[in-house]
Amino acid sequence: MRRNGWLNFAAAGTTAVSLFVLGISILLIVNANYIAKTVESNVEIMVYLEEGLKDEGVEALRMQIMRLPGVKEARFISKEEALASLERQMGKGSQLRESLGGTNPLPDAYKVRTVEPRQVVSTAAAINRLAGVEKVRYGQGVVEKLFRLTYWVRAVSFGVMGFFGLCAVFLIATTIRLTMYARRREISIMKYVGATDWFVRWPFLLEGIILGGGGALAAIGVLYFSYSFLAAKIQAALAFFPLVNERSVLLQLFEGLLTAGVGLGVIGSYISVHRYLRV
Amino acid sequence: MIQLYNVSKFYPKGIKALSGVTLQIEKGEFVFIVGPSGAGKSTLIKLIFREELPTKGQIYIKGRSIVRMKPREVPYLRRQIGIVFQDFRLLPDRTVFENVAFAMQVVGAGRAEIKRRVPEVLRLAGLTDRTQMYPRQLSGGEQQRVAIARALVNKPVLLIADEPTGNLDLDTSWEIINCLQEINQRGTTVLIATHAREIVDTLRQRVIALDRGKVVRDEYRGAYAHAT
Ligand SMILES: Nc1ncnc2c1ncn2[C@@H]1O[C@H](COP(=O)(O)OP(=O)(O)OP(=O)(O)O)[C@@H](O)[C@H]1O
Ligand SMILES: [Mg+2]
């Protein structure tokens, strides 16, 4: 073990890097989903109707909207209501109605919600094609960007993680092979005196588990401290910005990473043990 | 105890290490295997403890075919066979006691059993005052006796030695052979491959002579070479 210290370090280190990347990407994805959920109310679709649409047309449009896949509700907001809410937003002292001279330039509208936040983009596009719709607005592309981001995070991080994961398995296998080489005398004597295959193998599998598990623990440690640090910073700067910080979620993630690390260790050592410990 | 029927072992490139060997060794025998270098002595030993499989033929140990034996049964076969090599094969970073105890740990013996049994075999091998020494502190003969103690510690029914005196002077060789004889007298079957002509000629035990992979002579009370 001590003999090839740097290799042990490299094996555990690449495991750590691989799992760190996996952990970061999972945290990003979890948070993106979480943000999407909590800003769901902000990602309603505002559907502005054409000027002078008849009541039947308004009702027909509602039916058409409701028939689209993923639509949860469509609430009608008359131009009167819109003006009233605008007035409320601007404050009592404003002379909105007076300055408009009794006219109301605001259009009638539907406020549409989807079952899943990610359906907003496609639903908005579909509504835009309906007759009687003047304009469609939703979250200024926030949702779209969020999901495009998570898509790329997923793709890139899985690639990077896969690469480091393979390196980790290779380095663990090499480390184990060197340990076996250093202990070849003991191994051959063990076989002569009648050790079972598993008796000879398990110390090497254990070494693999320690390397993989050690790497995982390192990754978890770094991940935990950097994430808590970042979460605190973000929370302080942008109080409204929601980040997952529930212990249960993090704990589940860390358990998963530890299992993955041990898994990499077992795979790596099994490769060497299987190849070089034949009786 | 050991039966070989028409056993051949061919290595790649047409090397016939053994061809058509048939022989039987009974329980409690003391047997020398002799022959010139390359005759197939080591190959025969490797076949018996199933380090190698024969190309042809059958080998039985205590009535069981070790050719048809499943790989996972091999460790249990080896626990019944003690093996000693010319180069001792001790672990340099372990004491005499630990080297012998290692063989018991490997087969899952308990601590109490090890504490009781190891001094027993070390006494038999005449190493009682060497138990805490390391192999490099011992003479060649002493190292070989440690190897014999290790081979014996799990109470095998058969002890095989491949040139156990190959690295030792004549006096020390006698020491080792006497030790092996004593083990034989306690009931263990002993099989020794050797070039030690004087010893074989003096002891007049069973001698199996190999030459170019064939048994050319098998005599009780035999000598190293043909009686002329
Ligand atoms: N693993 C192997 N691969 C190829 N050829 C081998 C192998 N082992 C032994 N041989 C060949 O088989 C023949 C018999 O070898 P073996 O080691 O049995 O002889 P030996 O009687 O023990 O000789 P020595 O007295 O020198 O120890 C030799 O020609 C040897 O070169
Ligand atoms: Mg030989």
Image: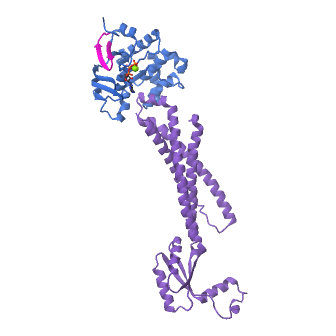
- Is A208 on the left-hand or right-hand side of B49? right
Q: Residue at x 56, y 43 (%)?
A: A11
Q: Residue at x 52, y 35 (%)?
A: A179
Q: Is residue B209 magenta?
A: yes
Does the magenta stretch mainly form a helix, a strand or a loop? strand
Residue A237 x/y as whole percent: 69, 65
Question: In this rendering, does residue B117 appear at all?
Answer: yes
Residue furthest top as drawn: B228
Q: Is residue B190 above or below residue A221?
A: above
Indicate the colour of chain B: blue
Query: Which of the pair A173/A232 is nearer the observer?
Result: A173
- Is A229 on the left-hand or right-hand side of B187? right
Query: Which of the pair A64/B113 is nearer the observer?
Result: A64
Quadrant where the image shows the C terminus of chain A: top left
Q: Quadrant of residue A248?
A: bottom right
Q: Is residue B79 magenta?
A: no
Indicate the colour of chain A: purple
Q: Quadrant of ligand 1?
A: top left
Q: Is residue A197 above or below residue B127?
A: below
| Boundaries of the magenta span | B206-222
Q: Is residue B8 above or below residue A154?
A: above
Query: Which of the pair A64/B28 is nearer the observer?
Result: A64
Question: In this rendering, does residue B132 appear at all?
Answer: no
Q: Residue at x 59, y 42 (%)?
A: A9
- Is A27 on the left-hand or right-hand side of B106? right
